[in-house]
Amino acid sequence: MQNNKFLKYIVGFVVIVVVVFLLIFSFGQKANGPVVNPQNETDVNQTIVGPISFTIDFGDGSKAKTYTDVPIQATTTVFKALKFVSEKNALELKYKDYGGTLGMFIESIGGVGKDPTGKKWWQYWVNGKYSQVGVSSYVVKPGDQIKFMFTQGQE
């Protein structure tokens, strides 16, 4: 009877030690694990590969806003980076997902995007060159300079 009681204490002690160890190990992994960028929860295991800069020109004559050191991962698209910048800087972002090869279409940024004439829309440039693909297709590279403009043509 005495041995049975002693065995229960030993098993209980071992269980407590294992639980404490797992808790400590779990917290340690979160602190030292991969960098998680909120641009996309599926990129959890990717690390930051470098920053890009982002400029948003609202096309109304006000000063354009520039955001530097925007962190990116190996699979970050222009859309993911724009979404990250919008969320971090409290800019309302409206978009429509057309799926497939069409991907995302930016409807408005910071409340700017409804042109009654239908001649202006959000367009973007990468390193000074007008983009030939949609925002959800271009994967940014470290050092890229992305510029969004609400404008009529390819200025």
Image (cartoon, grey):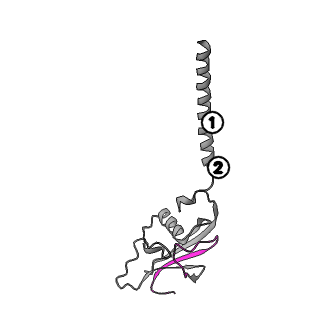
Q: Residues within 10 Å of mark 2 (few under 14, many from 20)?
A: few
- Of residues 87 and 76, the one drawn nearer to the viewer in this rendering: 76
Residue at (60% x, 25% y) in the render: 11
Residue at (48% x, 87% y) in the render: 153
Segment colored magenta: 131-155
Q: Is residue 9 magenta?
A: no
**Residue type, label 1:** Phe
Q: Considering the numbered disc 2 on the image, is that residue within a helix, a strand or a loop?
A: helix
- Of residues 2 and 72, the one drawn nearer to the viewer in this rendering: 2
Viewed as shown, does residue 108 lie left or right of 53? left
Up/down of 3 relative to 23, above or below? above
Measured from the top left, where is residue 110 in percent x and y? Answer: 42, 70
Q: Which residue lies under the disc numbered 1? A: 21
Up/down of 34 relative to 118, above or below? above
Q: Considering the numbered disc 1 on the image, is that residue within a helix, a strand or a loop?
A: helix
Q: Residues within 10 Å of mark 1 (few under 14, many from 20)?
A: few
**Residue type, label 2:** Asn
Measured from the top left, where is residue 28 in percent x and y? Answer: 63, 44
Q: Which residue lies under the disc numbered 2? A: 32
Residue at (62% x, 15% y) in the render: 3
Q: Quadrant of residue 34?
A: bottom right
Q: Residue furthest top?
A: 1
- The N terminus lies in which quarter of the figure? top right
